[in-house]
Amino acid sequence: MKTPSSLEDLIGALRCLPGVGPKSAQRMAYHLLQRDRQGALHLSHSLRHAVESVKHCSKCNNFSEEDICPLCSSARRETDQLCVVEMPADLLMMEQAQCFRGMYFVLMGRLSPLDGLGARELPLDRLVKRARELACEVILATNFTVEGEATAHYIATLLRSQGIRVSRIARGLPVGGELEHVDSGTLAQAVFERRAITE
Amino acid sequence: MKTPSSLEDLIGALRCLPGVGPKSAQRMAYHLLQRDRQGALHLSHSLRHAVESVKHCSKCNNFSEEDICPLCSSARRETDQLCVVEMPADLLMMEQAQCFRGMYFVLMGRLSPLDGLGARELPLDRLVKRARELACEVILATNFTVEGEATAHYIATLLRSQGIRVSRIARGLPVGGELEHVDSGTLAQAVFERRAITE
């Protein structure tokens, strides 16, 4: 008894998706062939179309279908601040918060030695070039994970050595947060990074 | 700030995969475009190829690229037993166990009212036809879940009303199982379905 080769091949191909092992891949392939062939064809087309259309913005490195993305080419953005984020989803969150009107740079990753991602795998040359071009303050908005912190530290050292002003978004209690329910690490940082009240 | 439309479309299309919500779909799309464009193209091709090539065997209803699958057309299989399983993966397990040399019928599902799968969604007409054609014993090897049990019960009633002999695979302790570590439901069934020792 053999599984048809095209089904075998599909199960193998589905494993390129992150977090999908052999059992999930099999379940997905069965589901698509049994219940959603239309969806499978749509997915096939979308994959090809996205691979062919999506490239990186030459300024902010975000995914874009144009050489320069709409945000970077917008005349309504301020150019005195450059915000560095790890992933496009982080940029979307920043935009949703409506707290920032400057430019962005998307790293498309973070320093992560365990995943084989070192400084060479991040587009740091282009970040430095962009920061010098704008001659502005760089705001590091990488995550407050171990990897995000290491990335921020590395980039800060790199940029400061070039005479570029660097800042880091603040750590502390979330808005609406209660001391009773916050973790002790966050509380300790909030005390350590307390701000003077000057009126 | 807008996500490129082809990327947006890919994120939407990935949600046809079972168990993939908006966050996972986004993560998958980013991963493919950022780290594995080759894999994405391969997946695109495999999806289309599988949808075009894979159909159902007209005898056993398993996935097959031919009208009658290699197992059903094999001269080396016995035709006095027909084993009913839920999914192709179950058939593979049966074959690996090398305990059965007869024919199969794959339901491609189970009775599952919560998922909108009733008796009408299962190919029961074809199962009855196939069982009458072979005029053989039907062995029900659906899972011992609530849904699998309900399916077995329904099919047994249906086939017996047509004068077809029906049996169910045995429940009990697994080989190598210890009473101390087995769940009480399984142990109770093993006692209830005990076999006389005749020698």
Image (tube, coloured by chain):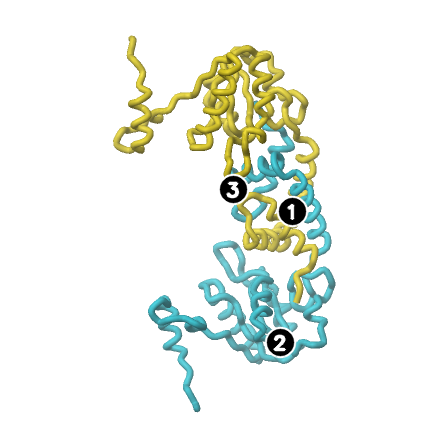
Chain colours: A yellow, B cyan
Quadrant of image for the C terminus of chain B: bottom left
Q: Disc 3 is attached to a residue of which chain?
A: B
Query: Which three-letter amino acid code belongs to the residue tagged 1?
Result: Ala
Instruction: Name which of mark 2 and mark 3 comes first in the sequence.
Output: 3
Q: Is residue A96 visible?
A: no
Seen at 67% across and 53% down, the residue is: A9
Q: Nearer the viewer, mark 2 or mark 1?
A: 2
Query: Tag count in the figure?
Result: 3
Image quadrant assignment for residue A191? top left
Same chain for the residues at labels 3 and 1, yes or no? no
Question: How crowded is the residue under tag 1: few (<14 C-alpha within 10 Å), some, or many (20+)?
Answer: many
- Residue B70: horizontal and vertical position, in percent? 71, 68
Question: How crowded is the residue under tag 3: few (<14 C-alpha within 10 Å), some, or many (20+)?
Answer: some
Quickly name the residue at label 3: B21
Quickly name the residue at label 2: B101
For residue B16, above or below residue B33: below
Disc ID at residue A40: 1
Query: Which three-letter amino acid code belongs to the residue tagged 3?
Result: Gly
- Residue B13: horizontal and vertical position, in percent? 61, 40
